Amino acid sequence: MQSLPIAHPGVAKTTADASLPLAYSTATLCWLLSAGVYIAAKWVAPEMPPWALCFWRLALACAILLPIVHHHHGAMLALIQSRAIEVLAIGAIGLTLCQGMIYTGLNYTDATTAGIIMALSPIMTMVLARFVLGEPLGVWKALGALLALVGMVVIVARGDLAALMRLQFNPGELWIVGSAFCWGLYTVLLRRAKFAIELLPTVVLLLGAGALAALPLYLWELFSGERSALHANGLLALAYVAGPGGALMYYLYNRSVETLGAGRASMLLYLQTVFVAVLAYLFLGESLHGYDLAGAAFIIAGLLLATAIKPRQRTVHVA
């Protein structure tokens, strides 16, 4: 996380059968592992700069998953040869920038607050899809986006109206807002790209592209004197974000999409916000602030307006 898994609509077919409970359990575990990335990133922050963490997480997760998709290596190579710049750009936006901004923001804000702000990403996706893909937004989606925006402002201003008037914001929350925007843009660009290979090979390609895009930023940190000094806790956190919170999380998401479809699997993303809050309380001693609760209420209301209310279809009578 988020870093967050990658939805690739149109690849997997939904199958309604006895395996649905297992699929929902798999998706739930996926988002629990994803939430753990926020905790690990916060934990390792004193020992590892954000872009170093971003590079190594992406590179190691890609290396772990690459042998699993060996049957697709030919198709992956063909995609790289024909659309390398597009793959690199989408990986850089959705994985490098999105994750690097989260890790940078966690140096200045709570993991709980970061998890709530990232719940904005579906709303941002809807708005960006209107401008990039020409998808209709509609009145309810527009109102939902507006309510979610109010929630984001409440959290970023930490409930302080005076700070809002003075445009004084915590840089941590602003980094996380930038990350949510990158995730929404990435989702829209991926939808437009329509890479004609299966989900998991696509994930592996984008992980590699994200690692490649993160390399210059990682090297810049090194030349700036920001070097990692990992001890036991830091190594454990890095192992988590690359393994259970990286490769395994992406693999489980792929499995859940195969059964639930990309739409339902992605909607379970909201579990991540709850898991982040619980894990941050248990492992980091964080608690919800009043502005977190107020902002979350606006965001949830906005999400409900945007996704739950469907416009009524007009009935056309033919004489």
Image (cartoon, grey):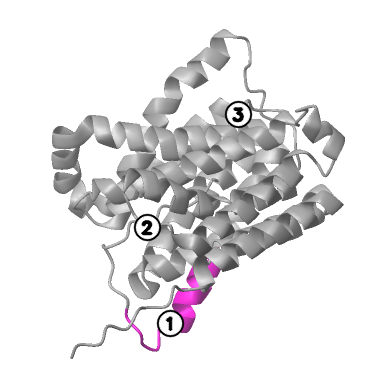
Q: Dividing the picture into quarters, in which one does residue 299 lie? A: bottom right
Tell me: 145 left or right of 198.
right
**CA gap, disc 1 and disc 2:** 31 Å
Tell me: 77 left or right of 43.
left
Q: Nearer the viewer, mark 1 or mark 2?
A: 2
Upstream in sequence: badge 3 or badge 1: 1
Mark 1 Cα-neighbour bin, 10 Å: few <14, some 14–19, many ≥20: some
Q: Residue 50 carries which label?
A: 3
- For the C terminus, the quadrant is bottom left
Q: What residue is disc 2 on?
A: 136
Q: What residue is disc 1 on?
A: 20
Q: List x then y, in percent, for residue 194.
A: 23, 51
Front-lying residue, 160 or 269: 160
Q: Are marks 2 and 3 in contact (CB under 8 Å)?
A: no
Secondary structure beneath dot 2 equals loop
Secondary structure beneath dot 3 equals helix
